[in-house]
Image (spheres, grey):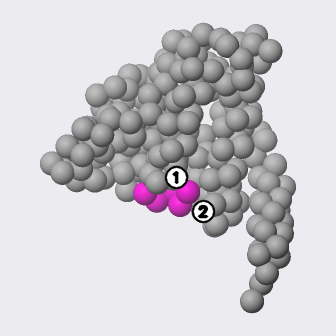
Amino acid sequence: MESNEAAIEHVFAEHLAVTEATKTAIPTILSITQALCDLIAQDGKLLICGNGGSATDSGHWSAEWRVRFKKDRQALRAESLVADVATITAAGNDLGFETIFSRQVEASGRPGDVLLAISTSGNSANILAAAQQAKKQNITVIAFTGGTGGELAKLADISFIVPSTITARIQEMHELAMHIICELIDKNLGVE
């Protein structure tokens, strides 16, 4: 049996290997940053959704936009679609769990907005439904996913795909990319 110290060393090694492999996505991170800077310049709204740990990332992104990243700046328009429990439970109960985000995109999204859809597998039915609804409404879809990107990457306008099938490592890279993008957006807004 592996010692606790060896297990920790293994996780660090795995994390570093995935981090190194994810560096190939730097052009994608730059494309996402540009799309989001354009969104801000047009006073559009960022809609964000995800399941499980990715749901928490959705709230984290929204807070970074609405409040601040590192330094004070203007509030940015963002909405975490996981925050409204009444809507989620009503849609899940009345229409089916796969509709919990697509109904909110239909209600809140406008042409020119951006949907940031987070799914480590790229195959979550409710995330796919949200992306499909966004496309119907001329909303740009940015996917954060892992592995091969799944069906979500095929629907998205821009896909940040972490080259791993390990959920924890994918989520760690999603958080890292989120923080990099927030830092670049602040830089572009003149917040330093």
Whichever of labels 1 and 2 marks the residue nearer the N terminus, that label is 1
Q: Position of residue 153 (x, y in %)?
A: 55, 51
Dot 2, how many residues are within 10 Å of its Cα: few (below 14), some (14-19), or many (20+)? some
Choose top left, top right, bottom left or bottom right for residue 162. Answer: bottom right
The answer to whether residue 99 shows anywhere in this view is: yes
Kindly identify which residue carries mark 1: 53
Give the amino acid at mark 1.
Answer: Gly
Q: Decide if residue 91 is on the left or right side of residue 55.
A: left
Residue at the extreme front of the image, as rendered: 4
Viewer-nearest of labels 1 and 2? 1
User: CB atoms at circles 1 and 2 under 8 Å apart?
Assistant: yes
Give the amino acid at mark 2.
Answer: Thr
Mark number for residue 167? 2
At 28% from the left edge and 47% from the top edge, which residue is drawn?
A: 99
Foreground residue among 167 and 43: 167
Which quarter of the rendering shows the N terminus? Answer: bottom right
Position above or below: 18 against 72: below
Query: Magenta-highlighted stretch: main secondary structure?
Result: loop
Residue at the extreme bottom of the image, as rendered: 1
Position above or below: 186 against 3: above
At 82% from the left edge and 73% from the top edge, which residue is drawn?
A: 5
Is 100 within the magenta? no
Q: Position of residue 126 (x, y in %)?
A: 36, 51
Position above or below: 102 against 189: below
Q: Decide if residue 190 is on the left or right side of residue 117.
A: right
Q: Secondary structure at mark 2?
A: helix
Write the start and end of the magenta stretch as one range: 120-124
